[in-house]
Image (cartoon, rainbow, N blue to C red):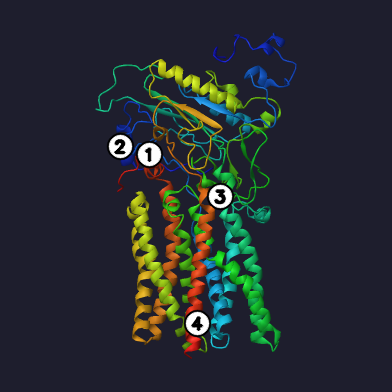
Amino acid sequence: MSIERYPTAIPPRALDYPTGTLPGLLPNEAELTAGVTIIPGRTYGFFTDTSLCIGCKACEVACKEWNALPADNLGLTGDSYDNTAALSATTWRHVAFVEQISTAAGDRVTAMTPYQSNWLMMSDICKHCERAACLEVCPTGALFYTEFGTVVVQQDICNGCGYCVPACPFGVIGLSHADGKAHKCTLCYDRLKGGLEPACAKACPTDSIQFGELHELHTRASQRLATLQERGVPNASLYGAPGTPGTTGGIGPLHAFFLLLDRPERYGLPVAPTLPTTRTRDSLLIGFVTLVSVAAGAFAVFRGQKNHG
Amino acid sequence: MDDHQPRAPYGRRRRDREMQSRPDSPRSSRQYRGESYYGRPAIRPSHWGWMIAGYYFVGGLSGGAQVIVTVADLVDPIGNRAIVRAGRYLSLAGLLASTPLLIADLHTPKRFANMLRIVRPTSPMSMGTWTLSIFSLAAGLTAFAQLLDDTTDTPAATTIARICSIPAALSGLMMASYTGALTATTSVPLWASLSHILPTLFGLASSASAIAAITLVIEAGDEPEAAAKLEPLALLIGAAEVVTHAMIIKTWQQKGVTGAITTTHLNPAHKVGMVGLGALLPTAIHLLHNLSGRRSRETAISAAVATLVGIFIERVVIIFGGNESARRPTDYLQFTQPEAAKGSQE
């Protein structure tokens, strides 16, 4: 646990369980492991601080284990240590690696910069947008906003129409050809209901992935950003926090937001995405008007033909 | 196995390796230079393919036909009876093909009825599902009443058909065009750049293909001379389509997203099939017919066949082009730059 998180080094509830073995599932375990009390009706999310990521992929493993996701991407991609490649229906955490080994002029770098030493490592995830495109285009109502402010696909309703897939501005949600439905990160909805913090946040050894109430995470992120910039990392920036890249075009704040150390495009993230459904009404209306014009043209033509025999 | 992302071609990846220089702040004013994450797509393509292209084609034709022949029936039911009859039966054929195509395309087809759980105004697919349902009922009843009229002596059949054709035409207005709104309400650059044009293109295409199909049916029937009545309308719609195609090409160029079409095998399909056969050739023929006052049966049938082939190709080019567009990270990351940083394209 990082010292910045708690006024004292040991969270108070840890003192209730001084032995190595536990009596069973702890009630409100998230208070112990993340210092967060999970109350339905409050907004929770992730702050992923990539300046702390060590690229261990514990988050990927924990996510796969908890959600019983199948193993996939078993080969090597050749893209540094990233053999997962992308988020998909069966991969809900994806650790991205970029090795920044040359200067703009093409020479090898000779100095190790503070934080991450010329590496970019970032654990990508569903952004759980404030206004989620996947949800707004879903025709069955399978996608819904939970009582924790997250976005979840109900697997017993989805019929695999696949409209959410091209709608997502971040390329997150995918269709599984194995079971015919759409899948994505649930922010461990089942764990939240049981008072546990999400699996990836619990597994992360450096607290790069921090789970908590969104407003608290925003405060923490701004402080962290200021600290980093003081310590000689001028290119650090937030992605998905209110008013930062990724929240544009009607999407709103991302409930899973990031602290990045380079331009978002280097991670494959769009700087100014838009929510596609802000265009729905105008689009449908324009189509309607087009056909009304066709009908008007038809009326004029047929009327003329009738009058002139 | 799930849908693993396809990898970018080698040339694009080599350029990305060269781009991995010192970090850069997103607030820096330098323009986006084409960086991406190993040339991997930043969004996911749809799974839509031939079946959805087929639905766009038959569903649009069905809706367009209902709109046009309902107007024809209301203006001059006696003079336009061949047109009305052909249109109503074609509309029935189209809607009978539509629902099975859509159900088969679902990845869990047995849950197709879940489409009717909600009405979601932000989702063109939700609005379209309800449109299809209402249209299928109304146009189906219209065709059934038309059949009664044609095969029996029921005097009320004509009136019943006319009454049912009103909601059929009203829902047909959406049937013929909503698929354009549906395709554009995504994050795919080739589609999203056309939010305000694609519904027009699809609406006109649906109407043009309806007229072409009705023409062929009438020419093969016992009142072939009635097909000539459709010539002026075919010309108007064809001309509007040509203008719309020009606007689309211009928009794609302005947004820098033409690569998905111009650098792939879709380029000839777009130029020759979608624009040439679908709009330019038929419009030229209809112009000739209307200006000269003479109409040869052969050229009229050629125009109709070209229209149908070209408009089917149009649906295919849009869908497959969009899927290709989604696989191009630089297209999307350029398309989603903040307005101030967007410079000249292509």
Nearer the camera: disc 4 or disc 2: 4
Residue B112 horizontal/vertical position (percent): 65, 56
Q: CA distance from mark 1 to mark 3?
A: 24 Å
For mark 3, name the chain.
Answer: A
SS at badge 1: loop
Kindly give the residue lying farthest to the right in the view shown. A23
Q: CA distance from mark 4 to mark 2?
A: 59 Å
Residue B111 horizontal/vertical position (percent): 66, 53
Task: Mark 4 or mark 3: name the one nearer the start of the chain.
Answer: 3
Q: CA distance from mark 1 to mark 2?
A: 9 Å
Residue type, mark 3 in image: Gly
Q: Which residue is mark 3?
A: A162
Residue B183 horizontal/vertical position (percent): 49, 55
Residue type, mark 1 in image: Gly
For mark 1, name the chain.
Answer: B
Residue type, mark 2 in image: Arg
SS at badge 2: helix
Task: Mark 1 or mark 2: name the one nearer the start of the chain.
Answer: 2
Q: CA distance from mark 4 to mark 3?
A: 42 Å
Mark number displayed over residue A4 = none
Residue A113 horizontal/vertical position (percent): 36, 17
For mark 2, name the chain.
Answer: B
SS at badge 4: helix
Q: Are marks 4 and 3 in contact (CB under 8 Å)?
A: no
Q: Which residue is mark 4?
A: A302
Q: Are marks 4 and 1 in contact (CB under 8 Å)?
A: no
* Most foreground residue, B109 or A288: A288
Q: Are marks 1 and 2 in contact (CB under 8 Å)?
A: yes
Q: Which residue is mark 1?
A: B39
Q: Which residue is mark 2?
A: B15
Circle 4 crowding by C-alpha within 10 Å: few under 14, some 14–19, many from 20 = many
Q: Is residue B93 left or right of residue B236?
A: right
